[in-house]
Amino acid sequence: MQGYDLIFRNVSLPGAQSGSLSDIAVRGPHIAAIRPAGELEEAAGAQEIDGSGHLALPPFVEPHIHLDTVLTAGEPAYNVSGTLFEGIRLWQQRKLLLTEEDVLTRAEAVLKAQVSQGILHVRTQADISDPGLTALRALLKLKERVKPYVTLQVIAFPQDGLIACPANEGRLRQALELGADGIGAIPHGEPTREDGIASLDMAFRLAEEHGCFVHVFCDELDDPGSRFLEAVAQRALQTGLREKVTAAHANATAYYPDAYFAKLLGLLVRSGTQVVSCPLISSAMQGRFDPYPKGRGIARIRELWQGGVNVALAHDDIRSPFYPLGTGSLLQAAHMAAHLAHMTGLSEMEELVRMITERGAKVLGIEAEYGLQEGKPASFVLLRASGSAELLRTQPLPRYVVSRGRIVAVTSPPVTALMEEFATGRSSKEEAVS
């Protein structure tokens, strides 16, 4: 009799025929076997769990979040206008108060909430615009602390710009020496178009020198004239960095003329540039300056995906100067994308789930160690849903979250009891008469 450390029995796998169930066996940190339900009956597991037909998925992937800004909404004030510009101004004030302990405490609390949501792979920004690199140092400590269970990639992000804030070039170099996984830029935040291009040249040059990825805040404006995405894609092609280049937000694509967008789409595909959209924050922040009818405010998710670009979805902000709401749930982000991107067809909703799992894993470059396959790390989630449409509709918390062979989160499903008169349709007085 072959023994396993853990067996989940009677689970539903993505793409399986209705009613077709499987068993997942874990040995150590890896998936040892995936078989049709019943074929592992002779195998014993030290721990066996009935999956009750729940859907098993690889863990959710968060490709763009600001763990340094989380839980600071209202400090020093709330963003009344709801604009990016006011959010940046408020964050510039709040980050003067940063300490490593402050960042660590807030970021770790949110990361634990993310794990309970089934997120086990995270790429976070760390603003390096302060001389002490406080946020970066704190998030690098957190990366090591959670390493046994969570993959955390840390980006050195020059929030105040590279040309507008010349000291940030040296800080990017220092951040890479300290252990940052990648670097960013914010070309649309620079004073001029020329400065934005210069900031991209600087970021790509550093990435080539250090062999790291580039994650650019790109065209987060409701402006058809903001066209840094083409410059990002061209540099991804010219440098050979290709899939190691990600453009986040890309809101201006919603305003581009169709002829120009068609040209841009071809360049994005040829270059391998990946796009991360943030539907929750974009839908709340963009369109503020539009007259009615207001724009939808997010990247052309459907058109980019259909054109061959790898598109992933992110939550982005949680209770910060940029967004006062947020739970961390990527299902919530995908649910918003279904509406804003007009992706409510069954195949489109299946694709939205891939955008918070497989496509996010591609952005992080972790495909080799990701997925529900024998021999890969035993990291997956079990959710009470029959498929993608129900998953997006109900947005359930995972029943179980497994990381590298160990159960790291369990959520008992809520139980609602209707009062008797509602359940039967008869009042208590009628019950007495009968």
Image: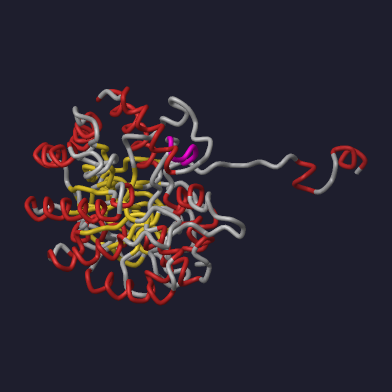
Task: Tell me if residue 83 can be seen.
Answer: yes
Q: Residue drawn 53% across and 49% down?
A: 288
Please, is residue 161 above or below residue 230 in the view? above
Instruction: Tell me which corner region of the image, top left, top right, bottom left or bottom right, holds residue 246.
Output: bottom left
| Residue interval drawn in magenta | 321-326
Q: Quadrant of residue 300?
A: bottom left
User: For the N terminus, which image quadrant?
Assistant: bottom left
- Can residue 9 be seen here? The reply is no
User: What residue do we see at 57% from left, 57% from top?
Assistant: 294
Pick the quarter of the image with the C terminus: top right
Relative to 129, is 208 on the left or the right? left
Does 135 lie within the magenta span?
Answer: no
Is the residue 340 above or below the residue 154 in the image? below
Residue furthest left in the image: 209
Question: For the view shown, which residue lies furthest in the right direction?
Answer: 433
Measured as percent of width and height from the top left, residue 181 is found at: 17, 46
Is residue 402 or residue 361 the one in the foreground? 361
